[in-house]
Image: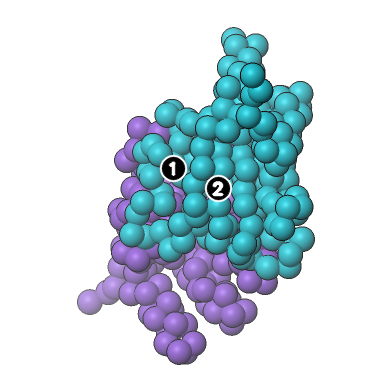
Chain colours: A cyan, B purple
C-alpha cells in the first residue's frame, strides 16, 4: 500500500509552517507556484514583523508579485497549509490567482468554506479553483501541537 | 446654515484619495488615529508597488503597526474614504482597531455592509465600532471622476 504523495509545493508549505512554529508564530506556511517553480513563499510573521496583515498567504503573494513586477498573479497557484481567513481569501481574489490548494480546513477562522465565504459573494471579482484536503493531517497536527504547547 | 464639518482624519483621507488619483491609483485614502494623532496613513498603491494587497487600509494599518511596534492597534481608529473590501475588513479585525469610519459605501466591492459582511461572521474574532456616511459625497465624486476619466 502506498500513500498518495503530497505535492511538492504543499510539502514546502508544511516545512514553512514548521519554521513558523520554531519562530513562535502560528504554524501556517504558503507558496506561490508558476510553471512548476516557486516564485514566492512565506509563513506567518505577524509577531516578528509587527504586521497584522502578515499571514502566510499575504507574505507569499506579496513576494510573488514583487518577483513578477505585477500586482496580478495570473496563471499562478497558491498552496497553503490552512484554510485562508477572509483577509487572505480577499487577497487571493485581488491577486487573480488561478488556483488555491489548502490542507486543513478552519471552522474557527476560515473565510472560504466557512463564515465570510469570500469567493461565493457577488462582490468577489475573481474566483480561483479551490482544492482541499491534501496534507491536512500534518497541517492540523502542527497547529494542535503549537497551541497545546502554549497552554 | 452651516454644513456639519468633516472630521479632520476624514479630510486627510480624502486628500490622500486625491493623491492616489494623481498617481493613477484608484482614489481611496485611509488614516489610523491614536489619541487624536495620525500614526499611519496611505492610499491605494497596488499598481505603483506591484502589490495586490496594497489597498489604502492595509497600507495605513501596516504603517501604524510599524510605528507602534505592535501587530495590534488597540484604541486606534481607522478612517477610510470607501467601504472596505473583505480583505481590508479582515485586516481591520486582525489589527484589533477600536473603530472604523468610512465615507462612501461600496455595493460592488464592499465586505462590511455588503457581501462577505466580515464583522458579522462567527469567524471574526474582533468587531470594531462602525460609522459611515461622513464625507461620502466627496469620496464618491472622486471615484466617479476617476473611473469616468479612464473610459
Q: Nearer the viewer, mark 2 or mark 1?
A: 2
How crowded pointer 2 is (Cα within 10 Å; few <14, some 14-19, many 20+) is rated as: many
Q: Nearer the viewer, residue A37 or B9?
A: A37
| Circles 2 and 1 in contact, beta carbons < 8 Å | yes
| The N terminus of chain B - image quarter | bottom left
Label annotation for residue A112: 1
How far apart in space, not on screen, are marks 2 and 1 (Cα)? 10 Å
Q: Give percent across and percent down for residue A148.
A: 60, 11
Q: Nearer the viewer, residue B139 or A57?
A: A57
Label annotation for residue B112: none
Q: Nearer the viewer, residue B132 or A99?
A: A99
Name the residue located 37 percent from the left edge and 44 percent from the top edge.
Answer: A116
Q: Give percent across and percent down for residue A73.
A: 63, 62
| The C terminus of chain B - image quarter | bottom left
* Residue wearing tag 2: A100
Tell me which corner region of the image, top left, top right, bottom left or bottom right, holds residue A50: top right
How crowded pointer 1 is (Cα within 10 Å; few <14, some 14-19, many 20+) is rated as: many
Q: Give percent across and percent down for residue B123.
A: 40, 34
Amino acid at each position: 500500500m502506498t500513500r498518495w504523495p503530497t505535492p511538492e509545493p504543499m510539502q514546502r508549505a508544511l516545512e514553512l509552517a514548521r519554521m513558523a512554529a520554531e519562530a513562535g508564530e502560528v504554524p501556517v506556511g504558503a507558496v506561490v507556484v508558476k510553471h512548476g517553480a516557486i516564485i514566492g513563499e512565506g509563513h506567518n510573521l505577524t509577531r516578528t514583523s509587527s504586521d497584522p496583515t502578515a499571514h502566510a498567504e499575504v507574505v507569499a503573494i506579496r513576494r510573488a508579485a514583487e518577483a513578477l513586477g505585477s500586482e496580478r498573479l495570473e496563471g499562478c497557484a497558491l498552496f497553503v497549509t490552512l484554510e485562508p481567513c477572509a483577509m487572505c481569501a480577499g487577497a487571493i481574489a485581488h491577486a487573480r490567482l488561478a488556483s488555491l490548494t489548502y490542507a486543513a480546513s478552519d471552522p474557527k477562522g476560515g473565510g472560504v468554506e466557512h463564515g465570510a465565504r469570500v469567493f461565493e459573494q457577488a462582490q468577489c471579482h475573481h474566483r480561483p479553483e479551490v482544492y482541499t484536503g491534501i496534507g491536512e493531517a500534518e497541517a492540523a497536527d502542527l497547529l494542535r501541537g503549537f497551541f497545546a504547547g502554549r497552554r
